[in-house]
Image: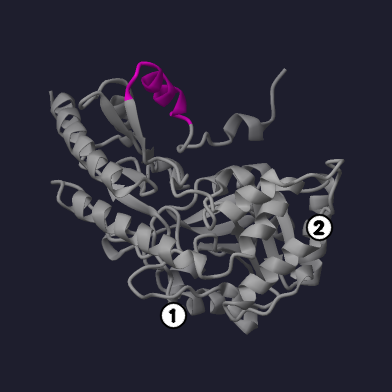
Amino acid sequence: MEISKRGRTVQASPIRKFKPYADAALKAGVKVYFLNIGDPDIPTPKPILDAVRSFNDPILSYGPAQGFLELREAIAAYFGGYGISLTADNVIITNGGSEAILLAFATVADSGDEIIIPEPFYTNYNGYASLADLKVVPLTLQVEDGYRLPPAAEFEAKITPRTRAIVLCSPNNPTGSVYSHDELRRVVEIAVKHDLFLIGDEVYKEFIYDGLKHMSLMEFPEVRDRTIVVDSISKRFSCCGARIGAAITRNEAVYGAMLRFAQARLCPPSIEQKAAIAAYKMGMGYFESVRREYERRRDVLYEGLAAIPGIVVRKPQGAFYMSVRLPIKDAEKFVLFMLNDFRLDNATVMVAPEAGFYATPGKGRDEVRIAYVLKEEDIRRSLVILKAGLEEYKGRAEA
């Protein structure tokens, strides 16, 4: 017997596939600084945890497939704070932002259809494209110019009769780039010209630095019916384990299709939705101190990396990741070396190899994604360990 082609070929997560090696290091008493995954150490706000603790319904029953009305109304109001007019009936609550991606892919395209995504991109786009049996058509961006979007002609060169959508993530995971109004306008015009959907992954919209502002694809009226936005509370409120996201669209046909898909999985988790309601009731003021903290961490990490010989990195404008080109040939081997063989004062660092954030074979082999989700002193210590590890690894490789 043979399993499906999807099952045989789906990509293992570059963020998680080395976890067994990290677990072995931890079991041996090694301190591991986890910079491989966007799981913040900033405490989950008390109102969210209080909502979980106070849940006392006598039966934990099914909820609506589209999520609780109160939460959908809260999310619509939250977007209203950014000047984006929505109603609860534009919002479907999902099992994390990841399910919102799957619903969007399954809704806009059929088996064998194509979606264009600038790379490097959030690695799970590859996984969900496999589940939906879609072809990811990558558009490679460059670290040297800060991963800016290219001219329209480069997008249009990727469009075929099977192209159904363009996916944009801003602020970007893994690069931290924030697309400007002009960059977004360029893609909006392409979508209209070629009759394409736009999928906007905007889960890091609160974390933008240097005085920049986030702009949503939903702010462009000409793609009002073409846009699906992916949203999540995971990073926004430091509660990745709650698994509450949202798929947002003003297109009634798209909404109806996503809702039917959502009905097939019954409903999102009830207790976590109650927690999410409490989160949105905290108001927009919560984000400023968190944003400043991430901006400080970004500056510490960037300055430390830029001082290491051979590293190529650009200062990100948002999210809490950096894409980093290392002076080595194979980042996966380097990650294994750090977890299995290298110790500095009985400590090591774990980062994510970035080849899995590309769809183009061979791309990103010398790159890693680093998440600045640890406190400043831990980032500084991680930089010391990373630099020493690179020096030893390069010496061994050359030998």
Give the CA separation, mark 1 to mark 2. 33 Å
Q: Is residue 90 above or below residue 185?
A: above
Q: Which residue is mark 2?
A: 259
Q: Residue furthest bottom?
A: 221
Q: Is residue 28 magenta?
A: yes
Give the structural element (helix, strand or loop) at label 2: helix
Question: For residue 141, which quarter of the picture?
Answer: bottom left
Q: Total of numbered circles in the picture?
A: 2
Q: Residue at horizontal 63%, vertical 63%?
A: 280
Query: Which residue has dot 1 on it?
Result: 182
Indicate the position of residue 355 as horizontal and vertical percent values: 40, 42
Of the two numbered discs 1 and 2 in the rendering, the one whose residue sits closer to the viewer:
2
74 horizontally vs 57: left or right: left
The amino acid beneath tag 1 is: Asp
How packed mark 1 is, by other alpha carbons closer than 10 Å (few <14, some 14-19, many 20 or more), is few
* Pointer 1 or 2: first along the chain: 1
The reply to whether residue 157 is visible in this rendering is no
- Residue 47 is at least partly visible in this image: yes
The amino acid marked with disc number 2 is Leu
**Camera-side residue of 109 and 177:** 177
Q: Residues within 10 Å of mark 2 (few under 14, many from 20)?
A: some
The answer to whether 386 appears left or right of 209 in the picture is: left
Residue 72 covered by magenta stretch: no
